Image (spheres, rainbow, N blue to C red):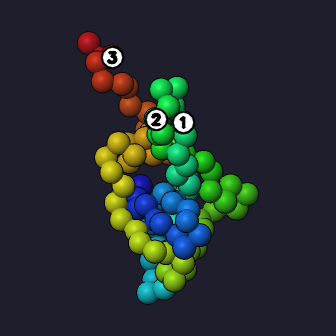
Amino acid sequence: MANIKLFKLITGEEVLGDIVKQTDDTFTIEDTVAIVMQPMQDGRLSPGFFPWLAMFDGPKTIKERDVICYGSPEAQLLSAYQSMFSKIITPKKGIIV
């Protein structure tokens, strides 16, 4: 989990994933989720994760021509993603005495 990027696709989808291979015209990513805005109880919208291409087995390949832009996700989104896919479980801050 070293190269996590957020992609904006021409379909309008925002996809977060770990790039495992990149060529001149494709990105191969794994542990993919779509970003969806979900309403909170106070009426504000908050980003949430939804499985992206959940029925596919293994990494997915996206053609560069289908990507509007891509970049590093902001810290809070990255942290939530990492806690979802991390193989290491870390305690919440303040629990260890």
Seen as rendered, the residue at the extreme bottom is 24
The residue labelled by disc 2 is 44
| Disc 3/disc 2 C-alpha distance (Å) | 30 Å
**Relative to 27, residue 73 above or below:** above
Q: Which quadrant is home to the C terminus?
A: top left
Tell me which residue sits at (28%, 18%) in the image.
94
- In this rendering, position of residue 41 left or right of residue 24: right
Q: Looking at the picture, how far across and down is residue 65, in whole percent?
A: 51, 83
Tell me which residue sits at (37%, 25%) in the image.
91
The residue labelled by disc 3 is 95
- Mark 1, Cα crowd under 10 Å, few <14 / some 14-19 / many 20+, is few
- Mark 3, Cα crowd under 10 Å, few <14 / some 14-19 / many 20+, is few
- Which circle's residue, 3 or 1, is located before the other in the chain? 1
The residue labelled by disc 1 is 39
Element carrying mark 2: loop
32 or 38, which lies in front? 38
Element carrying mark 1: strand
| Nearer mark to the viewer, of 3 and 2 | 2
Seen as rendered, the residue at the extreme right is 55
**Relative to 72, residue 76 above or below:** above
Element carrying mark 3: loop
Inspect the image, locate mark 2, and give the three-letter code of the amino acid beneath it: Arg
Q: Looking at the picture, how far across and down is residue 39, in whole percent?
A: 54, 36
- Mark 2, Cα crowd under 10 Å, few <14 / some 14-19 / many 20+, is few
Seen as rendered, the residue at the extreme left is 97
- In this rendering, position of residue 17 left or right of residue 54: left
Inspect the image, locate mark 3, and give the three-letter code of the amino acid beneath it: Ile
**Residues marked 2 and 1 touching at CB (< 8 Å):** yes
Residue 20 numbered tag: none
